[in-house]
Amino acid sequence: MFVIGTAPARVETAAYQSWGHSIITNPWGEVISQANEKMSVLINDIDLTEVEKIRKQLPILMHRRNDVYSITEINS
């Protein structure tokens, strides 16, 4: 999955001082884009086919042990 972490811009007079540095990472955890502590907007294209390629490289679902445990979905 791609991960997008957002943070408020730093306001030195505020009670809480944010570090800022909003970030976008690819499924390998590599930084695609990162802001600084100032007010910023990050705009990036995300290639969702990259997620599928990585899933094929890490076939963890193929090694699942249904004889040991089962995966159930809980609807709330």
Image (cartoon, helix red, strand yellow):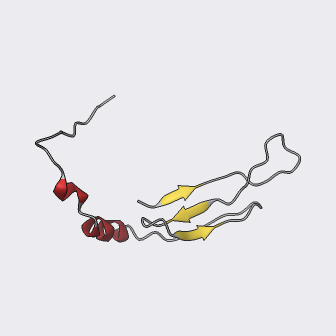
**Number of residue marks:** 0
Q: Residue furthest top?
A: 76
Where is 11 relative to 71, above or below? below
Residue toward you, 12 or 28: 28
Q: Is residue 72 left or right of residue 5?
A: left
Residue 50 picture location, percent across and down: 36, 71
In the rendered image, the residue lying farthest to the front is 68
- Going 38% across and 67% down the picture, which residue do you hit? 48
Task: Judge by depth and name the residue closer to the eye, 38 or 18.
Answer: 18
Left or right, 70 with reference to 20: left
Left of 26 or right of it: where is 76?
left
Relative to residue 57, is residue 1 depicted above or below? Answer: above
Residue depicted at x 23% and y 63%? 59
| Above or below, 56 relative to 22 | below
Residue 76, percent from left and from top: 34, 28
Of all residues, the one furthest to the right in this rendering is 13
Q: Nearer the viewer, residue 63 or 71?
A: 63
| Viewer-side residue, 5 vs 57 | 57
